[in-house]
Image (cartoon, grey):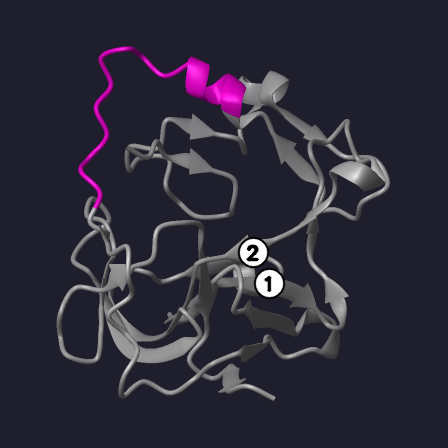
Amino acid sequence: GVVGVRVHLYPASDKGVMFDLLTNKWNDYRVRVQGLKNPDNLDVNVVGLRDMIPTNYAAAAHAFLFAEVSPYTEGYDMAYNINLDWGHEKWISHFVYDETENLYLRYSGDAPYLSYASATDRSEENITQMSFANVIIQRVPYEYTNNSKIMPVMQNVGKGNADIFIGGRYIPGYWVRNDVESPTVYYDDQGNELQFTPGKTFIAHLPPESLCTFSGME
């Protein structure tokens, strides 16, 4: 199950979130990493938070379905290169499909998007490029706290379109979330619940006006 952890500016404190890291209660479980720019330098001790979960806590059942072999092959366009344009050249994200590993490798511009082992272990030998079995571009409208562009509030209750990429293929789909207490459920182009490939999933809450493009093998 998944336990709520709030690290973004979203009014979720009254919606069952167990750890609100925007309060001072959990200062021992967060640290700002030196040398990285705020607000992207917040490191969270997820393992420590997990140990704080009451033993009698039961998370809601997860809605996702998984298939060992993706059903999205014949009739679906190839998608080996995905581009997300957030409105500024410095923020364009790319995902490149690795056929051998059946994963999408993430890039920021031309640079690989790298993950350190931890906030304290940033050694070169322990750096890995972030990769994902499933990439979902969930179209959601944005509102802004105090009209500030650095404090977006994604409106992710309701329904909308989704651009879905699995196994080097593009699946046009959509998402539904009935209320804030319910999980988001993703559907494919046939109206069936989406079948994810086992592994990590990247979900981007992209505004409807932002550009998402993809291409096949080059």
Q: Is residue 137 above or below residue 77?
A: above
Residue at x-position 80% and y-position 45%: 36
Q: Residue furthest right?
A: 35
Q: What stretch is highlighted in magenta?
A: 47-62
Please tell me whether mark 2 sits on a helix, a strand or a loop: strand
Residue at x-position 27% and y-position 84%: 74
Q: Quadrant of the C terminus?
A: bottom right
At label 1, counting other C-alpha atoms closer than 10 Å, the crowd grade (few under 14, some 14-19, many 20 or more) is: many
Labels 2 and 1: the sequence-earlier one: 1
In the image, 161 versus 103, the foreground residue is 103
Question: From mark 2 to mark 1, how far is it between C-alphas?
Answer: 4 Å
On screen, residue 153 versus residue 182, left or right, reads right
Q: Residue tagged by mark 1?
A: 105
Residue 67: x %, y % from top left = 24, 56
Residue at x-position 74% and y-position 46%: 38
Q: Quadrant of the N terminus?
A: top left
Q: Which residue lies furthest to the front in this view?
A: 100
Instruction: Name the image quarter holding residue 56.
Output: top left
Q: In this view, does 28 lie above or below 169?
A: above
Please tell me whether mark 1 sits on a helix, a strand or a loop: strand
Residue 131 is labelled as 2
Within the magenta stretch, is there residue 210? no
